[in-house]
Amino acid sequence: MSIRPIKRVLTPKDTTEGAGVRLKRAFGFGDTADFDPFLLFDDFRNERPEDFLAGFPWHPHRGIETITYVLAGSVEHGDSLGNKGNLRSGDVQWMTAGSGIMHQEMPKGDPRGRMHGFQLWANLPASLKMTTPRYQDVASADIPEIVDDDATRVRVVCGTFWGRRGPVDGVAADPRYLDVSVPPGVKKHLPIETTRHAFAYVFAGGGTFRDGSAPQGVLTESVGPPAVAPGASAPVRAEVGDRSLVLFDRGDEVVVQAGPEGIRFLLVSGQPLEEPVAWYGPIVMNTREELQQAWAELRDGTFIRHR
């Protein structure tokens, strides 16, 4: 097996979106090559209702898929197709914006005022940019959870892992979206197809992701440049904690060593599209001309193709 080296470790930045929702953005609105087919990842964890109750009022999307995973609180949503719903703890919504949709997402705290969830944007290939929009709302109870012999737990939201398939299907980038919990002190090898881009986002506990050939005691930088030790020809290991994103290089498995509190993280991978990206705000197309057309249609009221 070939262990995936660590390319970079990123710390999310404070960002305000929607009508004033304060969140942490791990990546987005920059060079898309390293994360292709994924475009953006937000952690909207908050314990102050005044920082999130204004929500994300009606806004457009075209050319992408948005994946919302709620861990605490709830998110009410509605759209131009007439869909309405309420995501609660453990639920997932996978929205294919396709040719264009208007929707809103309004978060609410749990009884203690807490809101916690993630949103990931996945790009659509050129052949599906103008496909019919659709939603897949998945209840927590329908997401399979695998418990390994060492008590490692994996919730399979999308894709196939350890013989179980997640309930989200028909997604263009053929992604794998896993919620992984590794108990204290356990070392775990997690397979990933070599051709996929992959990242892990830690949101509880801490531990170490590493290249099996890396020397002991050499750590990566916590933010920014490629994680390569001076004079080394390959990335080394990274000790990470809450709100750390680890971007992996090529290989067919990820190795994680859980710390004394255990570690919980999302492990996301997808087949890169390797297509040009023209992106402004909530609309992602392949060319500048397509992007200009989309915004012109928004102005003249012809943006929505399906109702």
Image (cartoon, helix red, strand yellow):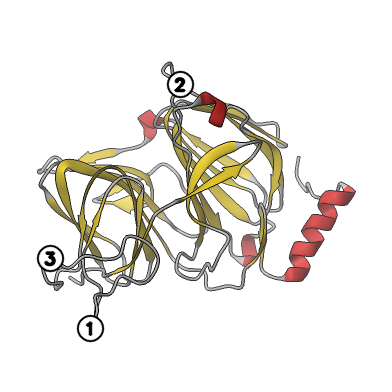
Q: Residue lying furthest right in this view?
A: 300
The numbered dot on residue 217 is 3
Q: Earlier in the sequence, mark 2 or mark 1?
A: 2
Q: Which mark is residue 161?
A: none
User: The C terminus is located in which quarter?
Assistant: top right
Disc 3 residue type (three-letter): Gly
The percent coordinates of residue 123 (x first, y second) are 56, 59
In the rendered structure, the answer to whether residue 9 lies left or right of residue 68 reads left
Q: Is residue 52 visible?
A: no
Say which quadrant the N terminus sits in: bottom left
Residue at horizontal 38%, vertical 33%?
A: 142
The Cα–Cα distance between marks 2 and 1, rounded to whole angstroms, is 49 Å
Label 2 secondary element: loop
**At 53% from the left edge and 69% from the top edge, which residue is drawn?**
31
Q: Amino acid at mark 2?
A: Gly
Pointer 1 residue? 231
Q: In the drawing, what numbered circle is on residue 113?
A: 2
Quarter of the figure with residue 190: bottom left
Q: Are marks 2 and 1 in contact (CB under 8 Å)?
A: no
**Residue 264 in the image: x percent, y percent?**
27, 43
